[in-house]
Image (cartoon, grey):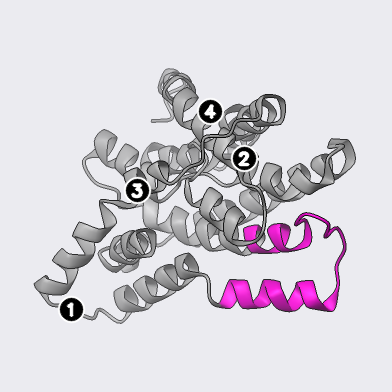
Amino acid sequence: VTLPALLFLDLYQADFFSVWDTGYVLYCFFATLICFTVIMTGASLFLKDKDIIGEFVQGSYRGSAAVLGLAFIQNIYGKATIAPLMIIGSVPLYNILAVLILSFTGPGEHKLDKKGLVKSLKGIATNPIILGILFGLLASVSQIKLPFLVTKTMSNLSVMATPLALIALGAGFEVKPALTASFIRLFVQCAVFLPVAAHFSFTGEKMVSLLIMLGAPTTPSCYIMAKNMGHEGVLTSSVIVLTTLLSSVSLTFWLFILKTMGLI
């Protein structure tokens, strides 16, 4: 309830007409898609326990771009004008890919079939995060003015998204695969795609938004989705805890590198 409210409000309040950058949105989209494909291929080849592939992949590629990311950018720039573009380019794809990978890699399910496909399509069509983004985008583009009572209520809901999701985490912990997924989430993706972004002349808030997309801690909603789709959730909760704790170090490190190179 709270996360879709947060996404709707952020996109509703964004001025897409003044900041739209097609190349930037496409870069966010394809960087996310490439990360997912490479991680999924590697996990399929090297993970012995096939039942945790879905959780490992989701925990590795899917960051907290909307929840922690927006707050992070606002603390640096005072506002997040470019972040909604990053959200459009990555977050819907985050959720579509998560539904697919979790559907086809559930405990005892390691193949593509009609039942799994129908389950995935239904999951995508009814995913509240995707719906929140879609309705927020439509409301922004159509320039609908919602009453203050509505936006204030949604704002009160949205501020609960991060703490509520973290409270909902389980107490289990898996060390080895969680450390690997956390390293991919916080360091590997940034090391690969931030230099490419610099090559395309993305600087300032665009670069920081990409840093959030690629290196923010794993979003707590991964745990909720994994549990709802029949997975144990232990690995997912472990990755969320580790990346949340270590991100204070990793994000500071990447900000220092970007600042030193004059990119922000």
Residue that label 3 marks? 164
Write down the quadrant of residue 61 in the picture. Answer: top right
Q: Is residue 40 visible?
A: no
Q: CA distance from mark 4 to mark 1?
A: 41 Å
Mark 1 lies on a secondary structure that is loop
Residue 115 x %, y %: 79, 77
Decide: few, some or many residues near mark 3? Use Cα within 10 Å; few <14, some 14-19, many ≥20: few
Residue 155 or 223: which is nearer the viewer? Answer: 223
Mark with earlier residue (4, 1):
1
Decide: few, some or many residues near mark 4? Use Cα within 10 Å; few <14, some 14-19, many ≥20: many
Mark with earlier residue (2, 1):
1
Mark with earlier residue (1, 3):
1
Q: CA distance from mark 2 to mark 1?
A: 43 Å
Residue that label 2 marks? 234
Write down the quadrant of residue 177 in the picture. Answer: top right
Mark with earlier residue (2, 4):
2
The residue under label 4 is which amino acid type? Leu
Residue interval drawn in magenta: 98-125
Mark 4 lies on a secondary structure that is helix
* Left or right of 51 on screen, residue 56: left
Q: Which mark is residue 242?
A: 4
Decide: few, some or many residues near mark 2? Use Cα within 10 Å; few <14, some 14-19, many ≥20: many
